[in-house]
């Protein structure tokens, strides 16, 4: 789909909201210039504005029939509306109406909002993909390698192949607690953060005085909003 044309909705209901907003907006008085309108301020020519007004005037009675709950909607009405949408999109494409707004020195933030212009405008910096929720996301921990005063651990999503982080996961935070080898897992308050998992693994170093004790671990995913997922099952390994 052409870049400029993509700013114009194709669906009947979405286009109805759009054309009504555009029509009302370009007809509003705007200064400067004195006596001008938003349409003239953004650089649209009188003939172009007249064509938009004409399309809007033909659209109005048809959309009323289309939304009539008494059964006035017909295939002919729908087809007529779709033809008007095509006519408006063709007008935009051939005359670069929206593209001219995008590069106009007189353009305002409101202009960009009305004409669905984001790329290269202040709207681009405040339009983000919705952050995925962590929901029930969690991970599993397995021993990869045990050496003198270190554990290398593999941390992955049990339901996903490979070591890539699950969609919506920005970080995997890793926690550790140390206790007696015969003890059960300590309370969660005993754990402290030791780092983030990188490419599915993390190396945790231990102090020499902990040899023979058990290191306990759990991990927790986090998204870009700082929301945490469900803590993993706690696992423990002897420190050698």
Image (spheres, grey):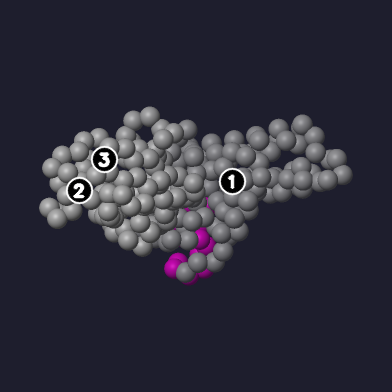
The residue labelled by disc 2 is: 212
Give yes or no for contact between labels 2 and 3 (Cβ–Cβ under 8 Å): no
How far apart marks 2 and 1 lie (CA) works out to 84 Å
In percent of width and height, residue 185 lies at 36, 52
Is 128 placed left or right of 62 in the picture? left
Instruction: Decide which of tag 2 and tag 3 comes sooner along the chain.
Output: 3
The residues tagged by marks 3 and 1 sit, at their Cα atoms, a distance apart of 67 Å
- Indicate which label's residue lies in the foreground, 3 or 1: 3
Element type where label 3 sits in the image: strand
Q: Is residue 169 magenta?
A: no
Q: Is residue 8 above or below residue 183?
A: above
Residue 38 visible at all = yes
Residue drawn at (27%, 43%) of the image: 237
Label 3 sits on residue:
153
Mark 2 vs mark 3, CA separation in Å? 18 Å
Q: Which residues are magenta?
A: 32-46
**Which image quadrant for residue 227?**
bottom left
**Residue 206 x/y as whole percent:** 17, 51
Taking the image as shown, residue 152 lies to the left or right of residue 115, namely left
Q: Residues within 10 Å of mark 1 (few under 14, many from 20)?
A: some
Q: At which x and y percent is residue 41? A: 46, 60
Residue 168 on image: x %, y %:
41, 45
Side (left or right) of 34 relative to 206: right
Q: What count of labels does the image hold?
A: 3
Comes first in the chain, label 2 or label 1: 1
Q: Residue at x 17, y 44 (%)?
A: 240
Vertical side of 164 occupied by 55: above or below: below
User: With 230 as the anchor, is 237 left or right in this view?
Assistant: left
Q: Identify the mark nearer the N-term, 3 or 1.
A: 1
Which mark is on residue 51? 1
């Amino acid at each position: 789909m052409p870049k400029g044309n993509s700013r114009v909705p194709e669906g009947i209901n979405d286009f109805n909201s759009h054309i009504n907003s555009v029509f009302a907006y370009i007809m509003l008085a705007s200064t400067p210039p004195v006596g001008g309108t938003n349409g003239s301020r953004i650089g649209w020519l009188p003939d172009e504005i007249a064509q938009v007004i004409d399309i809007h005037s033909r659209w109005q009675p048809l959309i009323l029939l289309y939304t009539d709950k008494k059964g006035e909607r017909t295939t002919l009405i729908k087809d007529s509306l779709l033809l008007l949408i095509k006519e408006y999109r063709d007008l935009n494409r051939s005359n670069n109406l929206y593209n001219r707004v995008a590069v106009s020195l007189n353009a305002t933030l409101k202009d960009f909002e009305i004409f669905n212009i984001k790329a290269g405008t202040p709207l681009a910096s405040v339009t983000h993909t919705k952050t995925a929720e962590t929901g029930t996301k969690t991970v599993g921990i397995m021993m990869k390698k045990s050496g003198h005063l270190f554990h290398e651990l593999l941390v992955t999503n049990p339901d996903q192949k490979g070591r890539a982080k699950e969609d919506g996961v920005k970080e995997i935070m890793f926690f550790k607690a140390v206790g007696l080898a015969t003890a059960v897992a300590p309370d969660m308050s005993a754990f402290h953060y030791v780092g983030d998992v990188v490419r599915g693994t993390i190396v945790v170093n231990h102090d020499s005085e902990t040899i023979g004790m058990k290191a306990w671990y759990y991990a927790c995913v986090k998204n870009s909003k700082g929301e945490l997922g469900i803590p993993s099952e706690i696992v423990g390994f002897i420190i050698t």
